[in-house]
Image: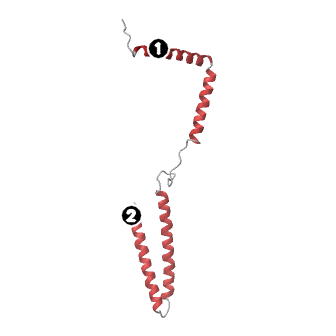
Amino acid sequence: MKTNTFFSLPSSKLSGIAIRIRAVVDAFFKQRPATVYFLMLALLGCSGLLCFTLLRSPAEKGQSIAGFPGQATQQVSGVYQAAGQLSQVLSMQAELKGMLGKKSLDHTDSLRIHQMIEKIKSLQIKNYRHEKNQP
């Protein structure tokens, strides 16, 4: 003989309700399969639409297409920086050649030549340190 406890009564009532709900849902699916099919397609379409429009998460800043965040932009900025330094060095070398081509140099020319040589050396050291830190 089965004894009724406090927890067995609600579970038997809930199982009866679950069986009735399942029977109603099965009957609806069997009577209207086309409606269920088109409802399923509509929900799938809405899900896809929401996935690619409203629920899209914003992309992180600095993330490149290749998936290496920030690395591509750092490399490009390094190239521009090196090109700028190279153009400075070339312009200073041209100015140095012009000054050294003079027959006589005064004190201001000597100071300017010394400053340009020091600037070229500092740019070379700065560029060497940058290249040394790159993988």
| Residue at image coords 48%, 57% | 72
* Quadrant of the frame with the C terminus: bottom left
Q: Residue furthest front?
A: 6
Taking the image as shown, residue 6 lies to the left or right of residue 76, namely left
48 versus 67 height, above or below: above
What residue lies at 49% left-to-right and 68% top-to-bottom?
Answer: 81
Q: Nearer the viewer, mark 2 or mark 1?
A: 1
**On-image quarter of the N terminus:** top left
Residue 92 image offset from top left, x and y in percent: 49, 80
If you read the primary sequence from the N terminus, does the residue marked by circle 2 or circle 1 appear first?
A: 1
Amino acid beneath label 1: Lys
Q: Position of residue 38 (x, y in %)?
A: 63, 27
**Which amino acid type is shown beneath numbered disc 2?**
Asn
CA separation in Å, label 2 and label 1: 73 Å
Mark 1 surroundings within 10 Å by alpha-carbon count, few (fewer than 14), some (14 through 19), many (20 or more): few
- Element type where label 2 sits in the image: helix
Q: Nearer the viewer, residue 12 or 88?
A: 12
Is 48 located above or below residue 82 in the figure? above
**Residue that mark 2 sits on:** 133
Q: Residue at x 47, y 60 (%)?
A: 74
Which residue of the protein is positioned furthest toward the bottom in this rendering? 104
In the image, residue 30 lies at what x, y percent? Answer: 59, 17
The residue lying toward the viewer, choosing from 13 and 81, is 13
Nearest the camera: 71 or 43?
A: 43
Q: Are marks 2 and 1 in contact (CB under 8 Å)?
A: no
**Kind of element beneath mark 1:** helix
89 to 12, vertically: above or below: below
What residue is disc 1 on? 13
Tag shown at residue 69:
none
Image quarter of residue 42: top right
- Residue 50 position within the rendered picture, expressed as x and y whole percent measured from the top left: 58, 38
